[in-house]
Image (tube, rainbow, N blue to C red):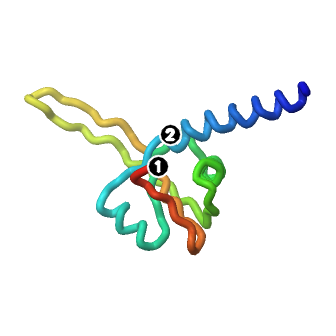
Amino acid sequence: MAKAAKKETKKVEAAEWMYEIISNPHVTEKGTRGSEHGQITFKVPLSATKPQIKQAVETLFEVKVKGVNTLIQKGKTKRFKGQKGFRGDMKKAIVTLEQGQTIDQFNA
């Protein structure tokens, strides 16, 4: 019985880090055009790796992932009412799904 409890604990811990990696979809015009080709874009932490992203998407959404491309969008210096501000860096993951697989990104 103790072994079953340990297995459940490991699954819960895995789900927690997966939710931290796949926090929310990045909805833009370009990202929406990618959905025509079976691609979906997510914001991910800067420390996330491609294998971690793939495992998290496959587990959370129960789909088969064909490939993962990542990019780091550097932050910009912006001005607001004369004050300088800085947007932080952001990492995006473009996940390509296998043929016939879909994710409803508006309910994700």
Residue displayed at 58% across by 53% down: 61
Residue toward you, 97 or 5: 5
* Image position, residue 47 (x, y; %): 55, 39
Label at residue 45: 2
Instruction: Give amino acid for label 1.
Output: Ala
Residue type indicated by callout 2: Pro
Q: Indicate the position of residue 88 as horizontal and vertical percent values.
A: 35, 36
The answer to whether residue 64 is left or right of residue 93 is: right
Residue 48 numbered mark, or none: none
95 horizontally vs 34: left or right: right
Q: Quadrant of residue 20?
A: top right
Q: What whole-number distance in Å separates the C-alpha atoms at marks 1 and 2?
A: 18 Å
**Quadrant in which the N terminus appears:** top right
Q: Residue at x 50, y 59 (%)?
A: 103
The residue that mark 1 highlights is: 108
User: Badge 2: few (under 14), some or many (20 or more) residues near its Cα, within 10 Å?
Assistant: some
Residue 2 higher or lower than 38, as above or below: above
